[in-house]
Each structure stands twice: as C-alpha cells, then as structure tokens.
Image (tube, helix red, strand yellow):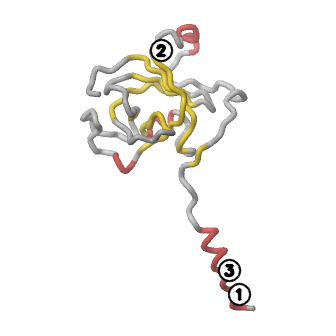
C-alpha cells in the first residue's frame, strides 16, 4: 500500500511539473470582440483606413523569435526578433502589410523581409516584436487579417 502511494505521488509530481504547450490556437468569437487600441493608426483616419488595401487574406498567424535572432533573413536583412517585420510564403520582399489580430482588433503595419516554411494553415509569421504589438505573444497563434498596402519590389 505504501509503495503504491509513493508511486502515485511521484506520478502526480511529474505531471504537475511537466511543461505545457507554448503555442495554442485560441478560438475567439470575432463578432463579439470590441475594437481596442489600433496600433500605428490615428482614430481620425477611420474613413481612409481601407481605401488603399490592394489584397486581403484572412487566416492564422504565428511568430518566430530566438532561434532566428541575429541571422540573415531571405531579403538579406539581419533578423531582429524585437523589430517589426514578417515572413510570408509568397509576397515579394519589401511588401508592406497591415496585420490585424481579429480577436482584439490591434493592428501593426510591417514590411515582409523573410520567407516562412509552407504551413497550409498559416498565412504569415510575424516577428516577436510584432507579436507583442498585436498582443498575441502568449497565445502564439491567432486569427488575423493581412492587408497589402504596398507591393514590394524585392526578390520573390
């Protein structure tokens, strides 16, 4: 009996101390979300907010950080995980996009300067700095809207 209790205690201890999944898909009811602070946009620009959008995608965004920090991106820039940049599977380097977190309506305007691995379920990888600005760093992946504001002229 004492041996069984000891084994049970050890198992409970290991389960309680195990690490949790860092990134979890968070299902947000976007119809219920109220607009919060929109990053890098003045409130009086509301009427002009969508007039210059060239293309829109809706899907899942993730972010990348430490593993690539200080390494060259596809465009040749050195990746700064605290900077405001993004990787996209097909947009030309230098394309300017506005990424909006559909849960909290926070958005950030950033350039594409890197390629991301093909993940059919994801449309963009943002830098850690952009993830913090979008308030998605804890969740890791969130539903977003990506709007192209200016096509880049860099390499494809």
Please rate how many residues cluster around mark 3, counting C-alpha atoms within 10 Å: few if below 14, some from 14 to 19, many from 20: few
The span from disc 1 to disc 3 (Cα, nearest Å) is 9 Å
Count of number-bearing discs: 3
The span from disc 2 to disc 1 (Cα, nearest Å) is 65 Å
Please rate how many residues cluster around mark 2, counting C-alpha atoms within 10 Å: few if below 14, some from 14 to 19, many from 20: some
Say the numbered circle drawn on residue 53. 2
Q: Is residue 155 left or right of residue 22?
A: left
Q: In the rendered structure, which disc, 1 or 3, sits on the residue that comes first in sequence?
A: 1
Q: In the rendered structure, which disc, 2 or 3, sits on the residue that comes first in sequence?
A: 3
Residue where numbered disc 1 is placed: 4
Q: Is residue 135 left or right of residue 67?
A: right
Q: Residue, x 57% and y 44% (percent of image)?
A: 139
Q: Which of label 1 and label 3 is nearer to you?
A: 1
Q: Residue, x 48% and y 14% (percent of image)?
A: 53
Image spot of residue 50 (x, y percent): 53, 13
Q: Quadrant of residue 14?
A: bottom right
Question: Outermost residue toward the right?
Answer: 1
Q: Secondary structure at mark 3?
A: helix
Residue where numbered disc 3 is placed: 9
The span from disc 2 to disc 3 (Cα, nearest Å) is 58 Å
Q: Residue, x 38% and y 39% (percent of image)?
A: 116
């Amino acid at each position: 009996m004492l041996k069984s209790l000891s084994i049970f205690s050890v198992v409970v201890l290991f389960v309680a101390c195990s690490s949790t999944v860092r990134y979890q898909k968070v299902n947000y009811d976007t119809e219920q979300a109220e607009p919060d602070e929109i990053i890098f946009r003045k409130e009086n620009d509301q009427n002009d907010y969508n007039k210059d959008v060239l293309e829109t995608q809706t899907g899942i965004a993730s972010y990348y950080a430490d593993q690539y920090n200080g390494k060259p991106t596809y465009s040749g820039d050195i990746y700064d995980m605290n900077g405001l940049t993004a990787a996209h599977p097909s947009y030309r380097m230098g394309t300017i996009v506005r990424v909006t977190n559909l849960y909290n309506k926070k958005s950030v305007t950033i350039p594409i300067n890197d390629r991301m691995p093909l993940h059919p379920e994801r449309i963009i990888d943002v830098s850690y700095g952009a993830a913090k600005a979008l308030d998605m760093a804890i969740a890791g992946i969130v539903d977003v809207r990506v709007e192209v504001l200016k096509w880049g002229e860099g390499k494809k």
